[in-house]
Structures are given as C-alpha cells and as structure tokens.
Image: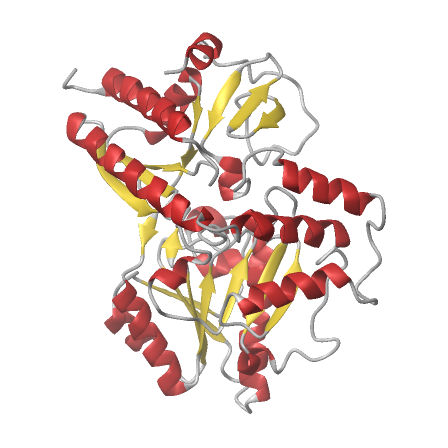
Amino acid sequence: MSGQLAQQMPTVPPSADTPTHVMGTYGPRAFAAVRGEGAYLFDDAGRRYLDFTSGIAVNGLGHCHPALTKALQAQSDTLWHCSNLFEVPGQETLAGRLCADSFADAVFFTNSGAEALECAIKIARRFQHSAGQPQRHEVITFEGCFHGRTLATIAAAGQEKLVSGFGPVMAGFKQVPLGDIEAVRAALTDQTAAILIEPVLGEGGIKVVDPDFLGALRKICDEIGLLLMFDEVQCGIGRTGTLFAHEATGIAPDVMALAKGLGGGFPVGACLANAGASAGMTPGSHGSTFGGNPLAVAVANAVLDVIDQPDFLQDVADKGAEFLQSLTALKSQWPSVVADVRGRGLMLGLQITGSHMDFVAACRVAGLLLVPAAENVVRLLPPLTITAQELSDALEILHSVAKRFSDDA
C-alpha cells in the first residue's frame, strides 16, 4: 500500500450523532464528505478514502475531473437555464452523439435515472395506444430489479422493502424470475406492452444477464409487438467496458434509460428510443423543467469527449478483467468470507458469507468505500480512470479486512 494512504487511514469511524434537519431517509451517515479528487474522497476530519462507490456509479471520471470542471465553469459564464420552450444547442449535440453511438433515433433528457425510467414507461404505453391497442399497458419486469424510487418505478420492482407503506401499489407491472424465459411467456397477456430489464443488475447484486436470455426477450418482443426496454442507469456509460452494457451481448433494445455516469457527477439523465418507439411522443405528451439544462448537457458532452478518446473503453475493460482475476484470487484465499465474485468491467461485486454491511464498515475504517447491494453483495464501482496503483491499494485493504473476518486466518 502507498505510504501516504497508509498514514491517512482512519482507525475509528467518525461520529454519526450530529443533529440534522435533513429528512431521515438515509439514516445515520458515516461521515461528512467535503472534497473529492480523482479516486479519493475526503471527510471533514481530513481523512482520505479510496472511493469505490463513485457516488454509486456516478463519478465515472473520478471527482472533479479537470475536463468536466472546465466545461461547467465555461457554461456557467454564459447560460444556466432557459427552459425547453427554446432550443438548447448542447442538447442537440448530446442527443446526436448518443444516437450516433447507439440504436436510438431520439432522446428525451431528464435529471435522474428514475425520471428516465418514468419516460420509458410512458413511451411504452403511448406506443401501444398509438398502435390502436390502448389495453396494452403492462410492463414485465424481473425479480431483484431496481428502477428507481418513484411510485411507478417501485411498482416496477415490486419489492416489499420498496413498496411497504406506499400503497396502493401502482398497477401495470408484473415481476417474473430473472432468466426464466418460460415464466416470461406465461406472464404475457393481451395487456402486455413492454419488457424492462437491466443488462447488469446493480442494486440486485451485480448480476450479469445471460445474452441468450436477452436474445430470447428480443425475439418475443419482435414476434408480438412489444417494446424491449433496457435500464442502463447504473451499468451504462462505460461502466462495463463498452459505452453501453448491452453492446457486449449484440442485443439492442427499443428504449434505454441512462443517467448516473452520463453527467460524471452533474445531475442528468436520458431516455433513448428508436423511431418506432418514440413516434407517439408528440408535443405536449411529456416534459421536464430542468431536463437537458444547459449546465447538465455541457458536462455530459465533456464526459463523452473523455470516454470517446482512443483506447479509453478498452482500458476500462482491461483493468476490469485484471481486477476481476485479483478478486477471484481473493475469494480463493478467503473462502469463508467471500462466496462469489461477479460483474464485468469496473462494475464488480463480492458476495460476502457473513454480514456484508459489517464488511463495508470495516473497509471504510481501513480507508476503502464500498456500496452494499442485495444478496449480501458489496459493489466495487471505482472511477473508470482508476490507476493500477489505486486498484492495488484497494486489493490490499480487501485482503486485510477479509483476513480479519476469516475462519481461515
């Protein structure tokens, strides 16, 4: 481990007893974050942490990347907001780039992933309505999925922990087991409008969906006139080593939701659709006050400028593959602690045999920030710009924590 990092590692977690007027939906927070630089996050006590949360796959280029800072500062000197009543040149540029790099023909800009998914759901219903089948309004989703925290997106997930206390649950969604194509077929009715899936589940435990399953979903949608919709809010924008996670499968959707890494830390989302899916989205059918704000699209265009550099995505794929091998070796050395290693690119997960929350807390105390997920999985989501030395430092911390938790030490 680098000497500077070792000297700055915290030995005790900071106090979470500070009074707050922020609504208590997040519970006690581990520390107050005050500064970020590259792969590091700093707290108000001056401690430095290797940040493998990346704002939950948001800070894809690390904290305060100079190209993003420059773009934001330049735009802030000219125009912050003007409403979508007027054309925003940066929107046109960004939409054109996203369409050129994907299956899509049109883009609707939002502020978040949940809003992008809301747009996708509306597109599915409007598509079927325009096709003369207004009864087709249901969306098939998958057990363990996560699509956001609006009333529609928690209904899409259908998980008790998300919908409890927020009933009645919005109608129009049907969950089936992930990977079970016969269950999908059994769920189809004359009310089905679309199928929605994450090519790589994030909150659901870093599960890479089998390309053959995605292909079977594509075939079903084509056969009976449904929309296939991908949620790439967490797994898109280079996170898995390709610009979009589904590129590795060869299966294209009709609609796709993006956010998180698209803005590199600035709030922005996007819903992409092909010409057929988007045809029903006529003037007045949808809107957003802040979606595609000049500041947001300036930063998002700067993100794409960096990711579009030669060999950038190949470097992400290479680093991810090498780190995955290192994590597999970690599992082999500490089998009583690590039950499974999952993921692709720099969207990786460790399934912990004991309490994954305790494992996350111990890593934080040792100077490494991780994100919990379902199925006792901890997510490792470093910035795509992570260096070999920083990956090595993280691996050393993971080994030290695993040793503490291990029956084999």
Q: Could you tell me which quadrant the N terminus lies in?
A: top left
Task: Name which quarter of the figure residue 175 lies in.
Answer: bottom left
- The residue lying at 40 percent from left, 44 percent from top is 315
Number of dots carrying numbers: 0
* 51 relative position to 76: left or right: left
Name the residue furthest front.
310
- Colour pattern of the rendering: secondary structure
Q: Could you tell me which quadrant the C terminus lies in?
A: top left
User: Residue 284: x, y in percent?
Assistant: 75, 75
Name the one closer to the observer, 235 or 384. 384
* 21 relative position to 130: left or right: right
User: Residue 58: x, y in percent?
Assistant: 54, 43
- Answer yes or no: is residue 358 visible: no
Task: Name which quarter of the figure residue 211 lies in.
Answer: bottom left
- Answer yes or no: is residue 312 visible: yes
Task: Name which quarter of the figure residue 185 lies in.
Answer: bottom left
Q: On screen, 30 above or below 72? A: above
Q: On screen, 179 above or below 186? A: above
Q: On screen, 327 above or below 299? A: above
